[in-house]
């Protein structure tokens, strides 16, 4: 791939200064144009920088739109790529300062350490985030993109690819952690002439934005991962199921698909081989349950997005009853890197059965709200305090919620726990897709449990009784507790019902819905008792009117 | 030539053909596994969760109506734990909407009422949700009282799979889920409804009923036509 | 030794459960051979007495008066039986719950009235926001659903309770 497709070039022109042409720029300013910084008018900064650079006659300077730089809390972000100097909360008036900095950059400059938020991370799935223009295939290829696919198609058999993925120890990054190699092998071996690959981009956990950032910042890596997977499982068609609430991700994906098709990385005869694979986008209409794979398949088929019992698993009987591989965005984002750098390298990262890295979206009462990627096995303390910069206003840490509405709250005494699929389950939480919500002493844990239960009851598809009715009943009990009107019998009822919903609900949404209740009861039972027995909310969140007490 | 599997249900040795569900094999052998969305002759959907059974070696419970048998399977269809779950699920159905047996057309002919009696459910620990839901009596012959609907979707399936009209479908989600006719227009205005009445016949409760029936007089006729219609449909290659 | 003291209470119900009680016919003689009926709509005592051994409560808790009564009954009763569907599930009285008190009274006393429409406020007790089963207000010891429970079931229940057995309510069901 030496020729950049004309479409990519023209799109790039719109944001890049014209004169960069042949030789590499002396200095470059990377402006984050992922959703968070975009919402803070980052695009105006890009335009302004371009204008000012042109006015100042800086012909050897590149102003580039890039994907997520990670530190979303401090957006809009601009980075001088050569020196790694980061400008935070950039306002139009700050543009002059950046132009000055660009003028000072010398060819001998090297990237300086950027502080623990960046230095403690290990970027694999997010290696191109903030490095490439997400709308430029050339940029992607310039950073090793599509090398893996080309090598796979020219040098490897599908078995080789599956074995490589199996050896890497990669597991599903959507949350459940199912071994990716095993899933690929199941699909490859399943009976059926037609097979499909689906990318699950229906990210819906409150506080989670990992998939969105990857799609907005590096869409080609997903397409490459999907194509490799399709080759490995003998599929020729793929779908990306993305929630419609991610318009920027969708438009960048659309463009990426078009560019990849024109450059011969999607469609018939990929990279001049006989391998065919094409991808279409399907938009979710705002149902959380459609992240569940069988509901997602129903939705892609154009039916009501409700789950069905498994088995049969989609790997055997999925989209239109054909064997279907469904992986999460982040899983696909790891595939290219694993095949480029080798399974031994990947398996060398991480801890125990949790290999590689995990992307987390830091949110809540944390200083450095943003997107981070760390090796599995890093402790929560390092993530929250070193990378996350601790809590806002230095308040005391109370809990961190992982795994979204199916996850749990992990208390301060477990901060030194090494994060892995297994350790999180052991403490009553769940890896989930990677949302990590930090809470301080102003959070009431009963109220938190109630919040997640409210979410689940809103999002229940209504198909099975335990989820449809049970989540509402659990919510009503939690509401009773937060109003100070509950008795100890109600608490017992809450625990009993939570257990029944967990055991009898049809899909992961219902089965996981009681988890926030279980984990808050496990670590913060005293807060429940304070509401019920003493009629007080220790965090001062719930309003308890004392009137009822006398009755 | 179909393969025959032998398995155990509640300690009894039973046999079934490959592709049969645990529910079907249990029915053939006179083992009663409760269920309200299951009805022979239409596709199963595993939604009511009453037929959940324990399968040795599997940590999760499985819906008997959706689980195909395998050789040597060891199924527990009745246990203390399952009874507790079934009671709880039946209770959830009762408290979800406004079931008032005393004034229901299906009083004494109701599968939900029978289920409560079979499970010896004498009261509800959970509070009633008491939603305000509608009654649609716009059809010439039939009416639907959503207060009594448990969303088993037998009506939706029989209308689609047997009658081929697909008048019924589902709208909204969670507690707001409702069965609907023709994209949510009144039943009486439906242009697809053939007024065949199959939906009324398969409804396990008094949600769907013939107009003009008094309390407790809404006996649903026997339904042997369903499996036969299924066979006819299959032989026509549809 | 004095006989066990039995009472019956009629809250928000249609009295059908009491009718079914009377349907025990000659078995009534057997029961009240072995127990004293100390309170209820069938006898003329004005105040719910102390030290009641068994009390059958018919009807849901719908008004402030019901609430006051049932609390008193609970205080003074050893074994409290939720007697019939209204007491057990709130049944027909509970049909107003989705509607709400104000629209309900408006419909009954204003909208559909031609002569001197007014919402009654004197003498009659105020309605509670919702009509609830007895066990949502006080602890209930035995549940006997049915609309009404059959005389046979009522007899079995009383027979068991008077004999000191755990009552066998097999066959009890909602509705009839």
Image: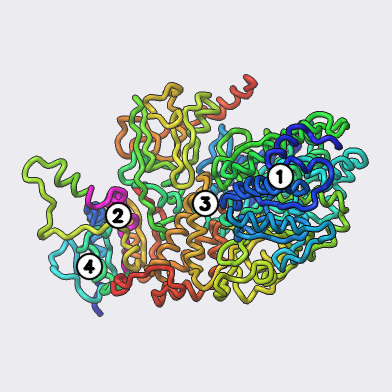
- The quarter in which the N terminus of chain A is drawn is top right
Is there a contact, CB below 8 Å, between mark 4 and mark 3? Answer: no
The residue beneath circle 2 is: C86
Which stretch appears magenta?
C80-103
Residue B53's disc is none
Q: Secondary structure at mark 1?
A: loop
The residue beneath circle 1 is: A134
Find the residue positioned furthest to the right. Answer: A155
Residue in the image at 31% along x and 39% along y: B215
Can residue B116 be seen at all in this image of the molecule?
A: yes
Q: Position of residue B91 (x, y in %)?
A: 44, 53
Mark 1 and mark 3 lie on one chain; the one further toward the N terminus is 1
Q: Secondary structure at mark 4?
A: helix
Q: Position of residue A492 (x, y in %)?
A: 47, 68
**Both on one chain, marks 4 and 3?**
no
**Both on one chain, marks 2 and 3?**
no
The residue beneath circle 3 is: A467
Q: Chain of mark 2?
A: C
């Amino acid at each position: 791939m030496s020729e950049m497709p004309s479409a990519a070039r023209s799109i790039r022109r719109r944001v890049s200064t014209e004169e960069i042409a042949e030789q590499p720029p002396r200095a470059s300013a990377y402006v984050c144009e992922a959703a968070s910084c975009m919402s803070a008018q980052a695009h105006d900064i890009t335009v302004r920088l371009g204008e000012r650079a042109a006015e100042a006659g800086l012909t050897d300077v590149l102003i580039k739109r890039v994907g997520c730089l990670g530190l979303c809390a401090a957006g809009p972000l601009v980075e001088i790529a050569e020196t790694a100097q980061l400008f935070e909360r950039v306002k139009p008036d700050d543009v002059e300062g950046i132009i000055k900095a660009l003028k000072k950059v010398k060819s001998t400059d090297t990237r300086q350490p950027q502080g623990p938020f960046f230095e403690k991370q290990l970027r694999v799935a997010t290696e191109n985030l903030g490095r490439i223009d997400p709308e430029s295939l050339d940029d992607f290829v310039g950073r090793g993109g599509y090398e893996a696919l080309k090598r796979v198609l020219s040098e490897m058999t599908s078995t080789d690819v599956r074995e490589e993925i199996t050896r890497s120890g990669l597991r599903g990054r959507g949350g459940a952690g199912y071994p990716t190699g095993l899933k690929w092998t199941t699909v490859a071996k399943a009976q059926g002439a037609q097979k499909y690959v689906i990318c699950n981009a229906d990210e819906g956990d409150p506080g989670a934005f990992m998939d969105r950032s990857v799609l907005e910042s590096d869409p080609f890596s997903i397409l490459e991962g999907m194509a490799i997977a399709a080759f490995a499982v003998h599929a020729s068609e793929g779908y990306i199921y993305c929630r419609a609430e991610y318009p920027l991700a969708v438009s960048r994906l659309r463009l990426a698909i078009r560019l990849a098709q024109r450059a011969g990385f999607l469609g018939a005869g990929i990279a001049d081989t006989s391998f065919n694979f094409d991808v279409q986008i399907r938009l979710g209409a705002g149902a959380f349950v459609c992240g569940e794979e069988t509901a997602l398949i129903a939705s892609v088929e154009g039916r009501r997005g409700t789950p069905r019992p498994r088995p049969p698993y989609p790997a055997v009987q999925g989209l239109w009853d054909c064997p279907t591989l469904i992986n999460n965005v982040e899983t696909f984002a790891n595939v290219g890197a694993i095949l480029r750098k080798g399974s031994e390298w990947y398996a060398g990262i991480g801890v125990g059965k949790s290999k590689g890295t995990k992307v987390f979206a830091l949110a809540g009462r944390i200083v450095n709200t943003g997107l981070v990627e760390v090796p599995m096995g890093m402790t929560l303390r390092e993530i929250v305090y070193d990378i996350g910069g601790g809590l806002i206003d230095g308040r005391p840490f109370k809990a961190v919620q992982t795994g979204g509405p199916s996850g749990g709250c992990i208390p301060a005494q477990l901060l030194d726990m090494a994060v892995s699929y297994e350790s999180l389950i052991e403490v009553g939480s769940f890896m989930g897709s990677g949302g990590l919500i930090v809470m301080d002493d102003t959070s009431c844990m009963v109220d938190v449990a109630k919040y997640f239960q409210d979410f689940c009851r809103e999002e229940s598809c209504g198909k099975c009784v335990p989820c449809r009715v049970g989540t509402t009943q659990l919510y009503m009990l939690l509401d009773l507790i937060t109003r100070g009107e509950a008795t100890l019998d109600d608490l017992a009822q809450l625990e009993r019902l939570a257990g029944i919903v967990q055991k009898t609900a049809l899909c992961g949404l219902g089965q996981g819905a009681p988890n926030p209740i279980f984990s808050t009861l496990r670590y913060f039972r005293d807060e429940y008792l304070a509401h019920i027995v003493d009629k007080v909310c220790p965090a001062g969140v719930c309003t308890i009117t004392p009137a009822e007490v006398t009755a | 030539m179909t393969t025959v599997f032998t398995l155990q249900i509640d300690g009894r040795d039973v046999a079934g053909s490959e592709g049969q569900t645990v529910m079907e094999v249990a029915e053939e052998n006179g083992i009663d596994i409760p269920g309200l969305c299951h009805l022979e002759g239409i596709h199963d959907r595993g939604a009511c969760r009453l037929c959940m059974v324990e399968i040795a070696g599997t940590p999760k419970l499985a819906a008997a109506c959706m689980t195909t048998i395998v050789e040597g399977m060891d199924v527990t269809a009745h246990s203390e734990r399952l009874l507790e779950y079934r009671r709880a699920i039946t209770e959830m159905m009762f408290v979800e909407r406004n079931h008032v047996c005393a004034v229901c057309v299906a009083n004494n002919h109701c599968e939900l009422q029978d289920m409560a009696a079979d499970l010896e459910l004498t009261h509800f620990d959970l509070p009633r949700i008491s939603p305000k839901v509608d009654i649609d009596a716009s059809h010439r012959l039939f009416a639907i009282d959503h207060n009594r609907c448990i969303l088993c979707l037998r009506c939706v399936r029989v209308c689609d799979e047997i009658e081929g009209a697909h008048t019924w479908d589902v709208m909204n989600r969670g507690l707001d889920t409702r069965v609907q006719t023709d994209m949510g227009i009144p039943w009486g205005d439906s242009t697809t409804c053939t007024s065949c009445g199959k939906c009324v016949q398969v409804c396990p409760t008094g949600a769907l009923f013939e107009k003009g029936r008094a309390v407790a007089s809404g006996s649903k006729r026997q339904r042997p036509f369903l499996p036969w219609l299924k066979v006819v449909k299959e032989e026509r290659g549809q | 030794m004095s006989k066990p003291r039995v009472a019956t209470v009629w809250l928000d119900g249609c009295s059908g459960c009491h009718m079914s009680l009377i349907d025990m016919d000659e078995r009534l003689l057997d029961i009240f051979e072995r127990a004293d009926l100390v309170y209820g709509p069938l006898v003329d005592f004005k105040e719910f007495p102390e030290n009641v051994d068994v009390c059958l409560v018919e009807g849901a808790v719908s008004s402030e008066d019901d609430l006051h009564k049932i609390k008193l009954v609970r205080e003074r009763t050893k074994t409290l039986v939720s007697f019939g569907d209204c007491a057990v599930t709130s049944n027909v009285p509970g049909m107003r719950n989705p509607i709400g008190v104000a629209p309900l009274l408006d419909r009954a006393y204003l909208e559909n009235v031609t002569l001197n429409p007014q919402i009654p406020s004197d003498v009659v007790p105020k309605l509670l926001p919702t009509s609830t089963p007895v066990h949502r207000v006080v602890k209930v010891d035995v549940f006997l659903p049915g609309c009404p429970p059959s005389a046979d079931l009522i007899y079995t229940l009383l027979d068991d309770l008077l004999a000191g057995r755990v009552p066998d309510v097999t066959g009890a069901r909602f509705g009839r």
